[in-house]
Amino acid sequence: KDLDKEMTESETEEKTSQEDYEKFMADAAEKRSLDAKSLENKESAKAAAEESVLTAEQEDKATLKELMANAEYIGSLHAECDWLISNFEVRKQARSDEIDSLGRAKAVLSGADYSLVQTSSHSRLLRRGRA
């Protein structure tokens, strides 16, 4: 009777242990599957992040090139403006003299006689030439 009882207990214990083992193996397989999916998702996220970093670096380089080109353009505009400002009075006087000359030429063509009249701009030109 003791032997039958021990055999029954052993069989029950073995059955329970087998069920526990099978449950443990199923849980382990499920965990491996979840871990594999998690690893795959993390690798995918890492690849996307690396691609994003690469794209951002390329955009940064392009933006830097554009910024340098803009700075160069602004520098050239600044130089051009400096030249215009420094030569404004000379150019203004030249335009004024040209307008006067065109007016006198028009008057001559209309019949006016300026042969004996000396204008102030011609005097300045003559004075500059002698200096």
Image (tube, rainbow, N blue to C red):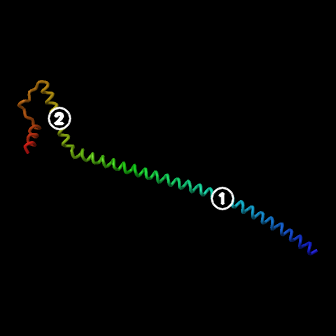
Q: Eyeballing the image, is 81 above or below 108? A: below
Image location (x, y in percent) of residue 60: 44, 53
Image location (x, y in percent) of residue 64: 41, 52
Image location (x, y in percent) of residue 32: 69, 61
Could you tell me which quadrant the C terminus lies in? top left
Comparing labels 2 and 1, the label whose residue is closer to the camera: 1
Q: What residue type is labelled 1?
A: Ala
Could you tell me which quadrant the N terminus lies in? bottom right
> Would residue 84 be found to the left or right of residue 1 on screen?
left
Q: Which amino acid does label 2 sit on?
A: Glu
- Residue farthest top in this picture: 111
> Would residue 57 be found to the left or right of residue 84 on screen?
right
- Residue farthest right in this picture: 1
Instruction: Please tell me the numbered disc located at residue 57.
Output: none
| Residue 97, quarter of picture | top left
Residue occupying image coordinates x 75% and y 63%? 25
Residue occupying image coordinates x 64% and y 58%? 38
Between 84 and 22, the one nearer to me in the picture: 22
Instruction: Please tell me the numbered disc located at residue 36.
Output: 1
| Residue 17, quarter of picture | bottom right
Label 2 element class: helix
Instruction: Please tell me the numbered disc located at residue 98.
Output: 2
- Crowding at dot 2, Cα within 10 Å, few <14 / some 14-19 / many 20+, comes out as few
